Amino acid sequence: MDIKMIKKLGEIMNSEGLKVLELSDGSFSVKIERDIGISILPPEKLEALGQTRTSMPQRILLPRMKRVSVQRDPKPKQVEGPKVFEIRSPLIGKFFAKPSDNANPYVIIGKRVRTGDVLCMIEVGKEISEITSEIDGEITEVLVKHNDTLAFDQIMFKIKEI
């Protein structure tokens, strides 16, 4: 699955007013969620709801994407001995190691993380997605820098499971 497909899924979510979209195809699955908010409805759907173009704003801004989970296997790929896993980029985009330029990074080498902890953020277009840990472990390597551009499936971190 490439970024064009993920963007197309986002467009489908917008056009249908969906909050969550989850697809699975064999060993690959994707789940896209967005914050609850106002969706853009095409004019024909507004008219079907009894709204007209004059009674509604011409353009309604969408909320930012809340979380994207892309998973190929139940756990990240195991490498380097018995319990070290690669965390790969599920998206093509800009890598953010910290929430702002003046803040501390989400993770550093040696930091322990738990399932669900934010590892980084990735910006695609103007949508920012949190990437969270799927395992409990310790960061052994950080392979990208703040503001780097990521390729799809690029290794970002290595985590030793604990």
Image (cartoon, grey):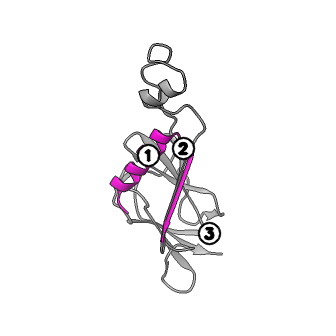
Would you say 147 lies left or right of 26 here?
Answer: left
Q: Earlier in the sequence, mark 2 or mark 1?
A: 1
Q: Which amino acid does label 3 sit on?
A: Ile
Taking the magenta stretch, the answer to whether it contains residue 11 is yes
Q: Mark 3 points at which residue?
A: 135
How far is the residue under mark 3 from the one under mark 2? 29 Å
Which residue of the protein is positioned furthest toward the bottom in this rendering? 81
Quarter of the N terminus within the rendering = bottom left
Nearest to viewer (mark 3 / mark 2): 2
Q: Name the residue under label 2.
A: 18
How far is the residue under mark 2 from the one under mark 1? 8 Å
- Secondary structure at numbered mark 2: loop
Q: Give the range drawn in magenta.
A: 1-25
- For the point 39% across and 66% down, which residue is it? 153
Taking the magenta stretch, the answer to whether it contains residue 134 is no
- For the point 52% across and 20% down, which residue is it? 51
- The vertical placement of 49 against 11, above or below, is above
- Res 105 label: none
- Res 12 label: 1
- Residue 80 position within the rendered picture, expressed as x and y whole percent measured from the top left: 48, 83
- For the point 57% across and 75% down, which residue is it? 160
Q: Which amino acid does label 2 sit on?
A: Leu
- Residue 121 position within the rendered picture, expressed as x and y whole percent measured from the top left: 49, 50
Foreground: 99 or 19? 19
Which residue of the protein is positioned furthest toward the top in this rendering? 54
- Asked if residue 80 shows in the view, the reply is yes
Would you say 88 lies left or right of 149 here?
Answer: right
Q: Earlier in the sequence, mark 1 or mark 3?
A: 1
Q: Which of marks 3 and 2 is nearer the N terminus?
A: 2
